[in-house]
Amino acid sequence: MGAAMRRIHVGNALSAFGLGFTVPYLYVYVAQVLGLGAMTAGLVLAVFAVAALIVLPFAGRAIVRRGPLPVLLAALVTAALGALSLGLAGGAAAVLLSAAALGAGQAVMQPALATMIVDCSTAETRSRAFAMQFFLQNLGLGVGGLIGGHLVDTARVSSFTLLFAIEAAVFLLLAVLMSTVRMPHAPRVEDAPTQAGQSARSSWRQLLDNRAMVQLCVLGFVLFFACYGQFESGLSAYGVQAAGISTSDLGTALAANTMMIVVAQFAVLRFVERRRRSRVIAAVGVIWAVAWGAAAYAGLGHGSQVMATAAFVSTYALFGLGEAMLSPTLAPLVADLAPAGMAGQYNSAFALVKQLALAVGPAVGGPLAASLPGPYVVTFLVFSLGISVLAVRLGRGLTAAQDRPWGARSRVV
């Protein structure tokens, strides 16, 4: 691992730390500490998501034209200003504008860092690099949430001001660190005569003409909708209402998910590296179907409360196993589908699909789980099996180098 890749991994950990440090406490801060009410707090969370959806299509084009490092530095400064403004805000308008800046900055960090990993890795090292990225992101989120939770006090506004000030300082420190990264030369749009002068619209048309990428985006939407989009909304509501899970046991389930990722990530990597990517994703669909089956037993079975709790915790653990298998698979596949110099555009498009799924997932899953727990769990079990079907279909349209990269020569993206 070179010096550039080490700094990129530190950047992934610190950016995730910043996300976990404050985002879980945004609602409490706006609604209770600032006294702006539940409606304003809900708007802040919505603005946070909408800002990401707005900037991601432009971020991809900027990464292609300017390179990932300048875009990342701009995103870090924007996120730092948004975080600091949130800590000092007093009115609803200031809070909403600050949340928009923070959400936009953090959304752009993901595809920029992913493109930097692509530029600094080869086909042989890319899966391991993205597995390390996912491991450090989860570690950063967990540590950030843990430390942030011990710093805040709803009785003291100053504790939240300190929280957001620390987050801003972390982003600025990361900007200084990343400015020292020496990126290898990677093709840009301007380097390719056939793409010179290409408009943003034509670059998106080119992406949409890539049938395999469109299939992967559809598959990605279902993946994120059926898993990540249910973690903190539908699945937790189902566990509490249908399975009778306590809030402490829900925390245990979330911890089991993180622990599975931390423990299994590099053990799973050895298995994944020599398997067809489409088959790995199909296997994840089967594992998640088993996870939803365990959730069905927890909420709809007739066992003891202890067995229901164990089944529910195992649901989150099985989701973690699937996530560990996806991390060295999805992102490298996006990179290998991208034409030379277009990795930033493709990474941003896939990040946009993920953001859409994370926005739609809770909106659909939460009310369905609360009102119809049986149909809810069956619906998402079917979605998980659909992942396997879509993955097999995707595999038919991939080249050998894209689906089985270990058998192909090293290629530079």
Image (cartoon, rainbow, N blue to C red):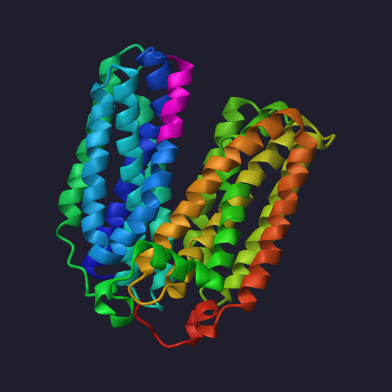
Q: Is residue 369 above or below residue 172?
A: above
Where in the figure is residue 91, as x and y percent of width and height?
30, 17
Which of 319/172 is in front? Answer: 172
Give the prevailing secondary structure in the magenta stretch: helix
Residue lying at 20% horizontally and 56% vertically, measured from the top left: 178
Which of 6/390 is in front? Answer: 390
108 falls in the magenta region:
no
Q: In the image, is 29 to the left or to the right of 281?
A: left
Where in the figure is residue 357, as x and y percent of width and height?
55, 47
Q: Is residue 364 above or below residue 91?
A: below
Look at the image and tell me in which quarter the N terminus lies.
Answer: bottom left
Q: In the image, is 306 to the left or to the right of 397?
A: right
Which of 265/391 is in front? Answer: 391
45 falls in the magenta region:
yes
Where in the figure is residue 238, as x and y percent of width and height?
69, 33
Residue 239 is drawn in which quadrant? top right
Residue 236 is drawn in which quadrant? top right
In the rendered structure, which segment of residues is drawn in magenta?
A: 37-47
Where in the figure is residue 213, as x and y percent of width and height?
52, 68
Inspect this view and state whether residue 113 appears. Answer: no
Q: In the image, is 155 to the left or to the right of 210?
A: left
Inspect this view and state whether residue 309 appears. Answer: yes
Q: Is residue 38 above or below residue 180?
A: above
Which of 265/365 is in front? Answer: 365
Point out the residue furthest to the right here: 302
Residue 246 is drawn in which quadrant? top right
